[in-house]
Image (cartoon, grey):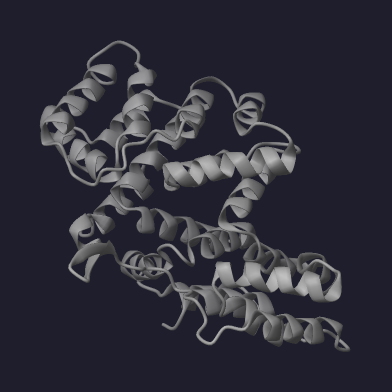
Amino acid sequence: MSIFKKFFKNVIHNRDPEDDTVTVKGKPKPKYYGTVSPYPNFNASSDASVLQSAIESKGVDEDVIISVLVKRSNEQRQKIKAVYEASTGERLDEALRGALRSDLEDVSLALLMTPAHFDAYQLRQSTKGWGTHEDVLVEILATRSNQEIREIKRVFKEEYEKDLEEVMQDETSGDFTTALLAMLKANKDENTEVNTGMARKDAEILFEAGENTSGIDVSAFINILTTRSGPQLSKTFQQYACVSDITLPKALNMELKGDIEDCLIDIVKCAWNTPAFFAEKLHLAMKGHGTCEDTLTRVIVGRSEVDLKKIVEEYRAMYDISLQEHILRETEEHYQKVLLGLCGPH
């Protein structure tokens, strides 16, 4: 659990939800922490034409393709896709699939998907073939809003002709399946106000369900960790320290093993500090021998219009190196250029 201890030690400074609002016309609105914003003077027809020329040019002009895709918002890319198909009779993703290769192809196709389609695709990839990528399932379901999860389920059924819940039941087992299905219900409290009384009561329930009993009542952990808001859970973790002489993550480590332990600890991390959770994901993807490009693409594309700016800040605070510097060390060529473009200046 040393990684977890380090994680909490480094992120404890940043948990105040009040920092995340800005007043616009007298009303509080969430600040924007994405690194990709709508391109000014956007012209879908012009961009579609530029992409067509870059794809059809002798040797393919990857630099032009990258400059367009990276500097447009997802909504703008959807409009470019529609115009491209209307004017050429070919889908843009199919054209890029034929023109690009390897990691650049993967990240370019990811940028063309809507967020819900990209998440549905990641969930499908994580549950097909040999082995299931349990960490990816938890990462997506624990960090999406109720509305986003409902949209992911709709798209998944539309694309793969199967209910996501059914796939989870087929590909996972035991308490881990129960936790995934609980998150798929999309009934997490999204109120940012904190109820201290509830936090104290929940902390006592978790203590009784874990440390203060023979065995462990996993259902109590699943129920609380999958239905409370992030700020509410953060308060619960603080209250837990008042009823126990060990931290909640350490208690989970002592009482649980396998997929359900990793799942619940990841939910705790997300509730405490979501950007730091993703910073750790990116760091592990580039640490040691080999780089996990799938993780880099999934996180950087998926969070580029959500909180990538915060992830970049947390990365430097946690690892004493900028995310961009680490990407420069561990990736190369056009794929590197896309990732750096999405991360923004450093």
Q: Quadrant of residue 61?
A: bottom right
Percent x, y of residue 4: 35, 46
The residue that appears at 65% across and 31% down in the rendered structure is 163
Q: Quadrant of residue 126?
A: top right
Residue closer to the observer: 321 or 288: 321
Q: Where is the C terminus found, in terms of image quarters?
A: bottom left
Instruction: Report the number of discs.
Output: 0
Residue closer to the observer: 147 or 220: 147
Residue closer to the observer: 172 or 245: 172
Left or right of 177? Residue 318 is left
Percent x, y of residue 245: 15, 31
Left or right of 42? Residue 334 is right
Percent x, y of residue 116: 58, 51
The outermost residue toward the right is 58
The residue that appears at 63% across and 52% down in the rendered structure is 117
The residue that appears at 27% across and 57% down in the rendered structure is 11
Q: Is residue 198 above or below residue 343?
A: above
Q: Where is the N terminus found, in terms of image quarters?
A: top left
Q: Is residue 56 above or below residue 89?
A: below
Q: Is residue 43 visible?
A: yes
Q: Quadrant of residue 218?
A: top left
Q: Is residue 262 above or below residue 310?
A: above
Q: Is residue 258 visible?
A: no
Percent x, y of residue 2: 35, 47
